[in-house]
Image (tube, rainbow, N blue to C red):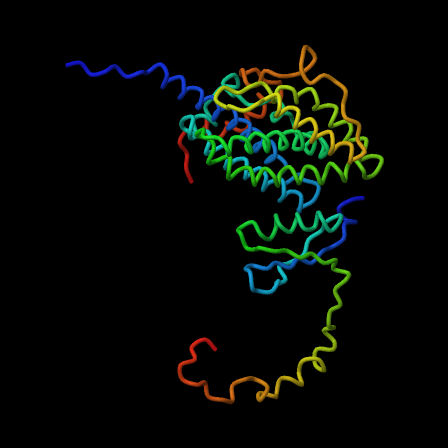
Amino acid sequence: MTTPAPTPTTEKTADTSATAAALALGDDALVLSHRLGEWAGHAPVLEEEVALANIALDLLGQARVMLSLAGDEDELAYLREERAFRNLQLVEQPNGDFAHTIARQLYFSTYQKLLYGQLATGDSELAGLAAKAVKEVAYHQDHAEQWTLRLGDGTEESHRRMQRACEALWRFTGEMFQPVDGVDIDWQDTERTWLASVTSVLRQATLTVPEGPRTGAWAAGAGRQGLHTEPFGRMLAEMQHLHRSHPGATW
Amino acid sequence: MTAHDWPLWEVFVRSRRGLSHTHAGSLHAPDAQMALRNARDLYTRRSEGVSIWVVPSTAVTASSPDEKDSFFEPAGDKPYRHPTFYEIPEGVKHL
């Protein structure tokens, strides 16, 4: 008697694309969490430092759940090489001045909210996490929006810096809408909604919506394929240094 | 405008429905909306609250420590104002 052969191919494909999705979105959250954590001890005021640290911790919590779906969270976070990370190039960009951090937050949290909102209503492995995380991310977006309005429509200097930050990060925003394997949503529609939302906030903040390219030769974007920008290597070195020097260390 | 120019706000948090708002502390913020958000991050991180009020510290009129004697001491020797001079009827548990 022969047992019916299992169908490894289809199962494997489903598993692989679920892993790919968890890895891509998990890496986004992990890397941005680390960047925001760099503000600890350096934020302009104590209240804002706590706000940024709170956001970083929310993201770290999301990263842990997603990386655990993809494998061993510690191994994935601390022992992968730069080329194995699947995060967007936007989230690895250095903090810059406060305006750069806020522009990065505005672009990314708007994207993440749309993404999680759609994942939460689906039936993927990430639906549970997305349903919980979308509330956290809604607050992140509100925080970024409030600051964008105040910096854009604030003093001459804050307006100039906020405008500069929005322009500088604009070319990293097209990459966000490259379809992620395992995330079954309408990416074009998501991009349209994102653009409308960000445009509305920038206009309200008396800022000019950047005109530079978001996709194409002059735009950034291959983070999902493992290609990263120069500052990412330095960030990883700092993030992974302790674990690599003292493997398995506990306290 | 630097952080040192930011006004001070008093934060009141209601921990559960049915309870009153209680003073939780104070913080700096550029305006009321940001004060609310800072209060959320500083005072309700461990799910301490269901509602927050923020009030400019300058709007608070406080009793003066110098007037402490005339303000509070006269109440000190009037124990009959405390509801302790009657017997609690049997069967009343939560009084």
Let me know if residue A246 appears in the view: no
Q: Is A249 positioned to the left or the right of B23 in the image?
A: left
**Quarter of the N terminus of chain A within the rendering:** top left
- Total tally of numbered discs in the picture: 0
Residue drawn at x 35%, y 14% is A9
The image shows residue A143 at horizontal and vertical percentages of 66, 40
Which of A236/B60 is in front? B60
- Toward the left, the furthest residue is A1
Residue drawn at x 75%, y 24% is A167
Give the quadrant of residue A144.
top right
The image shows residue B74 at horizontal and vertical percentages of 67, 85
Which of A86/A82 is in front? A86
Q: Is A144 positioned to the left or the right of A7 in the image?
A: right
**Quarter of the C terminus of chain A within the rendering:** top left
Give the quadrant of residue B49.
bottom right
Which of A4/B82 is in front? A4
The image shows residue A178 at horizontal and vertical percentages of 58, 18
Let me know if residue A224 appears in the view: yes
Which of B61/A130 is in front? A130
Residue drawn at x 61%, y 34% is A36
Q: Is residue B32 above or below residue B19?
A: above
Residue drawn at x 48%, y 24% is A21
- Toward the right, the furthest residue is A156
Give the quadrant of residue A89.
top right
The image shows residue A8 at horizontal and vertical percentages of 32, 16
